């Protein structure tokens, strides 16, 4: 049994599509063991199964308490902290100012965000004179 360039190319393609070794063997008319052995020699990465991935997501490391979207209520500050693309992204979670979406600190931050702080402080300084 010999591996032609064409077969190797097909093996790579089928492997990358996520077919099982048994299915790839059928398509290439070789044994499953031949597929496994060749894939190993080619250095093709064995991708984790979807089931294993789900298990990893279901059991995240909880070293410290962070507020995620599911932890939020009308009483918790929903100010986002960190980058949503990163794992450590979470929400403030502090008790909100009544009637507001954020805690006192982040209400202030949200208010400042809609104005230019430098101008405001300058105006305040002028008014106090
Ligand atoms: Zn907050």
Image (cartoon, rainbow, N blue to C red):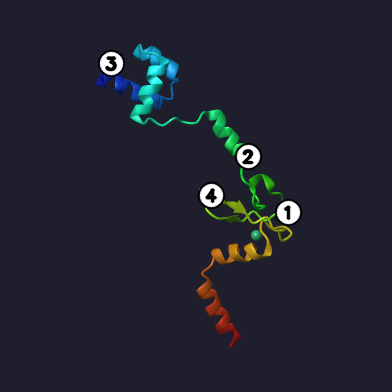
Residue beneath label 1, please?
A: 75
Sequence-wise, the earlier of marks 4 and 1 is 1
Q: Residue 127: image x %, image y %? A: 58, 83
Distance in Å between CA atoms under marks 2 and 3: 45 Å
Viewer-side label of 1, 3: 3
Residue beneath label 4, please?
A: 84
Q: Residue 99: image x %, image y %? A: 72, 57
Depth check: give the residue in front, 112 or 64.
Answer: 64
Q: Residue furthest left?
A: 5
As drawn, the label of residue 59 is 2
Sequence-wise, the earlier of marks 1 and 3 is 3
| Helix, strand or loop at mark 1 | loop
Q: Residue 116: image x %, image y %? A: 51, 69
Sequence-wise, the earlier of marks 2 and 3 is 3
Depth check: give the residue in front, 98 or 71.
Answer: 71
Asked if the residue under mark 3 is in contact with the one under mark 1, i.e. CB atoms within 8 Å, the reply is no
């Amino acid at each position: 049994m010999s591996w032609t360039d064409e077969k190797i190319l097909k093996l790579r393609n089928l492997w990358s599509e996520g077919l099982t070794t048994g299915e790839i063997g059928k398509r290439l008319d070789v044994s499953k063991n031949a597929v496994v052995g060749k894939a190993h020699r080619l250095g093709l990465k064995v991708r984790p199964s979807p089931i294993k991935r789900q298990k990893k997501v279901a059991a995240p490391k909880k070293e410290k308490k962070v507020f995620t979207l599911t932890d939020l209520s009308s009483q918790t500050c929903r100010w986002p902290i960190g980058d949503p693309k990163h794992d450590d992204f979470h929400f403030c979670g502090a008790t909100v100012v009544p009637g507001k979406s954020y805690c006192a600190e982040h209400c202030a931050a949200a208010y400042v965000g809609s104005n230019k702080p430098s101008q405001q402080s300058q105006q305040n300084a002028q008014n106090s004179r």
